[in-house]
Image: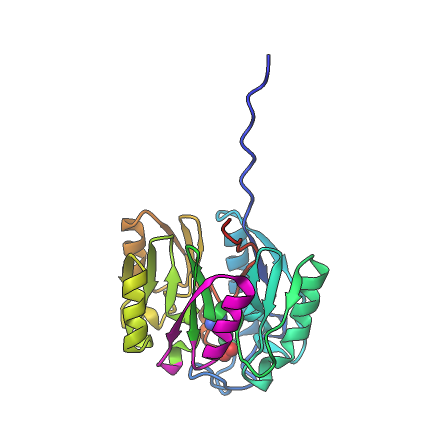
Amino acid sequence: MATEPREPAPRRPRLLMVPPEHYGILYEINPWMHREVSVAASTAVEQWTRLRDLLSGPLGADVHQASPQPGLPDMVFTANAGLVYGDRVILSNFRYPERQGEARHFARWFEEHGFRVEYLPAHLSFEGEGDALFLGDTLFAGYYWRSDVRAHSRLSEMLGVRVLSLQLVDPHYYHLDTCFCPLDEQTAAYYPPAFDDYARRVLAANVPQLIEVEPAEAARFACNAVVLGRQVALNTGCPVFESRLRDLGFTPHATPLDEFLKAGGSAKCLTLHLDRQPLS
Ligand code: ARG
């Protein structure tokens, strides 16, 4: 008797992270960073490890790790390494010289792990998934503080996807992933004051269900959440957003990330999705 074809086991989502061995506030390139506020190194390691274990345990991800490099304290924020699409990665062109040294280390990691590394023209800044998030088959892309709007049209040509450009206006929310979080094909959370009027209209017209995050929770980086199916990993201190998530059928997992807020980053910034797939 013929056996029933078995469903292939669902693939575990893959994420890239960099351990915080060389993390610290060595310069100031966003309003959250103050050199005089020191990072508690052992707490940072503990918080990072808890996040990694949450993602690879209950949230079911395969977490890959790239090596941290001395003198590149922001390398922990791997969302800025580039934008993965299938087996391709569009590498970031970091705006500030302080972070530009990260690019070659990330390029090497991608090459060694079977990705095709592609480059934007050098004069166009682009900070990877920090400023470019898919919702369905549309790429929502932030610009002004870190990425150039002209990089978006190049991205659209290179990837053959629809890109909607959104201007960011508040320096505290300098990357799109600090103020916008796609939850599923229909739904995204956002912090409206981070966007200009036109961007807010673009969002309203293109996202069927928009969830507003309140100011105090936006400042706790509520939008900077890692979404894996219906599971959401985020910083502590966002109870209103958490209960909204539950109402929508998501399960929030709060984990303390205060040491990383000191550099202007949280859960999402600390991870890069390695399996964004072109929809066929
Ligand atoms: N200190 C880093 C910077 O200013 C934080 C990056 C946060 N990353 C993110 N994807 N939002 O570049």
Locate the N terminus by quadrant: top right
Query: Is any atom of residue 45 visible in this view?
Result: no
User: Residue reaching furthest right?
Assistant: 112
Of the pair 185 and 112, the residue shown nearer to us:
185
Q: Looking at the picture, how far across and down is residue 79, in whole percent?
A: 53, 67
Q: In the depicted view, which residue is nearer to us: 37 or 109?
A: 109
Residue 196, quarter of picture: bottom left
Q: Residue at x 33, y 56 (%)?
A: 187
Q: Residue 116 at what x, y percent from top left?
A: 66, 62
The reply, left or right, for residue 152 in relation to residue 243 is right
Q: Which residues are magenta?
A: 143-171
Relative depth, front residue between 43 and 187: 187
| Point 51% across, 49% down: residue | 280
Where's residue 94, x and y in %? Answer: 56, 79
Question: Does the magenta run of residues contain 152?
Answer: yes
Residue sitting nearer the eye, 152 or 239: 152
- Confirm whether the magenta stretch covers residue 18: no
**Eyeballing the image, is 265 above or below 245?**
below
Which x, y percent locates residue 30? Answer: 46, 83
Can I make out residue 56 in this image? yes
